[in-house]
Each structure stands twice: as structure tokens, then as C-alpha cells.
Image: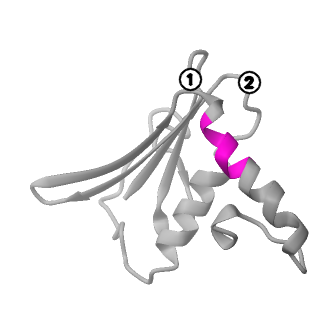
């Protein structure tokens, strides 16, 4: 499995926190996604991406015109399975922001991530 995350060119960090968290969640499932490969040589350092947990590679792209996109690519002999999410407008984040604003008064401690209050 490999992760490709793409964001606008004003995003300062790479890889994104979402890509790192996706790799951590996949690694936490206890499966071996990327067994040892043949010895490879990168002709340009970093060309194969950064290696995160469980040997999962993360590739980061920063270009004007992008908002936020992520692909998780699973490969097996004879097949590829790709999960992709594309954000084309930041307005799609508003329902989550409004939900968090409504729920924050009910929280008893610090919460990281909307998945804990959905």
C-alpha cells in the first residue's frame, strides 16, 4: 500500500497529518502491507516517498490549483485497488466545523479528531 496526498502550494507541511494518520491506522491493523522488496536504488533521493509505519510509503505533492486530495493504493498480483478523496472547495468542511462548535460545550476533556464526536 502507498499513500499519495496532494495539496495547494501554500500548505507548508509535508506529508499531511491526514496521510500520516492514515498510515498509522493501516499499520495498526496488524497486517503486512509492504513486504520486503528487491533492493532498489533511488536515482533521486526521496523519489519513492517517505517511509511511514509498517513500511507504508507516503508521497506528497504541492501545486497551485489543488485544495486537498488523498489516494490510498493497494496493490496485489494482477490488481490494484484505489481509494481516493478529493476536496474541490473548502466549503465542504463547514458541516464538520459547525458540528464541532455545537458539541464542544459538551466535552469534558480535549478531543483530537472529529471521528470521536460524530
- The residue at the point 65 percent across, 47 percent down is 95
The residue tagged 1 is 66
- The residue at the point 81 percent across, 59 percent down is 102
104 magenta-colored: no
Quadrant the N terminus occupies = bottom left
- In magenta, the rendered stretch is 92-97
- Which numbered marker is on residue 87? none
Pinpoint residue 70: horizontal percent, then vertical percent.
48, 43
Answer few, some or many: residues within 10 Å of disc 1's Cα (few below 14, many 20 plus, some between 14 and 19). Answer: some
Is residue 27 shown above or below 1? Answer: below
Number of numbered labels in the structure image: 2
| N-term-proximal mark, 1 vs 2 | 2
Real-space Cα separation, disc 1 to disc 2, in angstroms: 10 Å
Quadrant the C terminus occupies = bottom right
**Residue in front for this viewpoint, 32 or 11:** 11
- The residue at the point 36 percent across, 69 percent down is 33
Pinpoint residue 75: horizontal percent, then vertical percent.
25, 57
**Residue in front for this viewpoint, 7 or 98:** 98
Judge left or right: residue 17 versus residue 103. Answer: left
Q: Main secondary structure of the magenta part?
A: helix
The residue tagged 2 is 10
- The residue at the point 47 percent across, 70 percent down is 26
Which residue occupies the extreme left position in the image? 78
Answer few, some or many: residues within 10 Å of disc 2's Cα (few below 14, many 20 plus, some between 14 and 19). Answer: few
Secondary structure beneath dot 1 equals loop
Judge left or right: residue 47 versus residue 100. Answer: left
Pinpoint residue 29: horizontal percent, then vertical percent.
45, 80
Amino acid at each position: 500500500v502507498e499513500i499519495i496526498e496532494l495539496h495547494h502550494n501554500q500548505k507548508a507541511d509535508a506529508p499531511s497529518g491526514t496521510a500520516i494518520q492514515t498510515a498509522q491506522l493501516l499499520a495498526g491493523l496488524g497486517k503486512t502491507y509492504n513486504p520486503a522488496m528487491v533492493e532498489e536504488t533511488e536515482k533521486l533521493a526521496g523519489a519513492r516517498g517517505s517511509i511511514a509505519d509498517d513500511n507504508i510509503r507516503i508521497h506528497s505533492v504541492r501545486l497551485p490549483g489543488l485544495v486537498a486530495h488523498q489516494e490510498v493504493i493497494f496493490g496485489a498480483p494482477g490488481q490494484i485497488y484505489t481509494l481516493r478523496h478529493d476536496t474541490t472547495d473548502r466549503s465542504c468542511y463547514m458541516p464538520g466545523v459547525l458540528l464541532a462548535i455545537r458539541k464542544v460545550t459538551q466535552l469534558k476533556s480535549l478531543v483530537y479528531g472529529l471521528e470521536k464526536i460524530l
